[in-house]
């Protein structure tokens, strides 16, 4: 059967491959944060979200325990999502600057959001074997979407993207390109890769990642993908 984003979504949501992550995501959903005591948490792996014809893939680390793990949508319901979607809206990639819950009217244009790990991990730190278990989902999304560019949020997403490119046949230079905010990699047969510090509160509230800094890398990734405000005719896909 031909793969599709709908089939990938189904497989992601049904996954129980990592016992530690299954236990943690379900415990968080059961105990809840006091502010959300009256809400029913999603408490499952979180599928990718966005435009099925996207030319830009935004790749994060993992769902937030009380954000995406609560709402069931990537970068939704927490401060990281507010920072991300505000920038995507300014770039013409999102219909609104906020993402509070599924069904809130948010739509992405030319952009799709995913993560290296699909379950909320303890301390926001998925183990290497857990990232490896999730890697086939990213491979499948890249094969279906065939994006022109990937924006990696943080070092883990950067490494996950490079590993996915290599599994798809791209030749990586040695040593592998190092993560740095604003770094770019162009490989034959792979999407352009752009790096940003993660949009976590640890970065945005300390000034390590400012809105202006993030807007600049979003604009660059959108430019490479041929989407967003000011985009010209679409470039050929890799």
Image (cartoon, grey):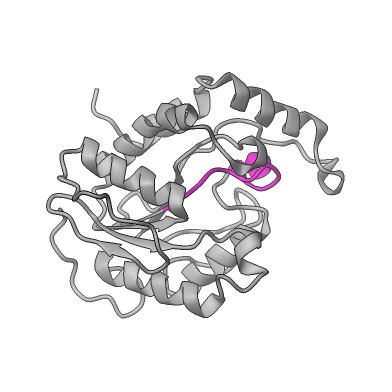
Question: Residue at 20% across / 38% down in the picture?
Answer: 168
- 109 relative to 207 in the view: left or right: left
Q: Where is residue 225 drawn, in percent x and y?
A: 27, 64
- Rendered image quadrant of residue 125: top right
| Residue 49 visible in rendering | no
- Rendered image quadrant of residue 54: bottom left
**Camera-side residue of 224 and 109:** 224
Assign the N terminus to one quadrant of the image: top left
Q: Where is residue 88 drawn, in percent x and y?
A: 47, 68
Q: Is 63 contained in the magenta span?
A: yes
Q: How many marks?
A: 0
User: Given the current orientation, which residue lies at the most extreme front position?
Assistant: 175
Question: Residue at 74% across / 28% down in the picture?
Answer: 27
- 40 relative to 163 in the view: left or right: right
Q: Is 174 contained in the magenta span?
A: no
- 190 relative to 178 in the view: left or right: left
Question: Residue at 33% across / 47% down in the picture?
Answer: 161
Q: Where is residue 212 drawn, in percent x and y?
A: 51, 80
Image: magenta residue range: 59-72
| Residue 158 visible in rendering | yes
**Camera-side residue of 113 and 22:** 22
Residue 14, relative to residue 152: is it above or below? Answer: above
Question: Residue at 33% across / 72% down in the picture?
Answer: 220
Residue 97, relative to residue 236: is it above or below? Answer: below
Residue 11, relative to residue 38: is it above or below? Answer: above
Residue 176, relative to residue 183: is it above or below? Answer: above
Q: Where is residue 134 drawn, in percent x and y?
A: 43, 31
């Amino acid at each position: 059967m031909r793969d599709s984003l709908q089939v990938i979504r189904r497989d992601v949501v049904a996954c129980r491959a990592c016992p530690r992550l299954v236990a943690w995501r379900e415990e968080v959903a059961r105990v809840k944060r006091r502010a959300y005591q009256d809400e029913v948490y999603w408490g499952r792996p979180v599928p990718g979200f966005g435009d099925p014809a996207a030319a830009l893939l935004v790749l994060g680390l993992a769902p937030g325990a009380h954000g995406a793990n609560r709402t069931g949508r990537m970068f939704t319901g927490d401060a990281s999502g507010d920072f991300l979607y505000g920038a995507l809206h300014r770039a013409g990639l999102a219909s609104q600057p906020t993402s509070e819950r599924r069904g809130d009217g948010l739509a992405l244009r030319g952009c799709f959001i995913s993560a290296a790990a699909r379950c909320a991990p303890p301390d926001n730190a998925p183990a290497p074997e857990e990232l490896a278990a999730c890697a086939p989902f990213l491979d499948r999304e890249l094969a279906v979407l065939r994006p022109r560019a990937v924006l990696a949020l943080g070092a883990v997403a950067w490494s996950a993207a490079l590993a996915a490119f290599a599994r798809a046949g791209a030749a990586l230079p040695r040593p592998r390109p190092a993560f740095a905010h604003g770094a770019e990699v162009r490989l034959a047969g792979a999407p352009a890769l752009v790096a940003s510090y993660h949009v976590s509160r640890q970065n945005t509230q300390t000034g390590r990642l400012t809105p202006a800094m993030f807007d600049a890398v979003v604009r660059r990734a959108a430019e490479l993908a041929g989407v967003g405000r000011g985009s010209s005719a679409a470039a050929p896909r890799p």
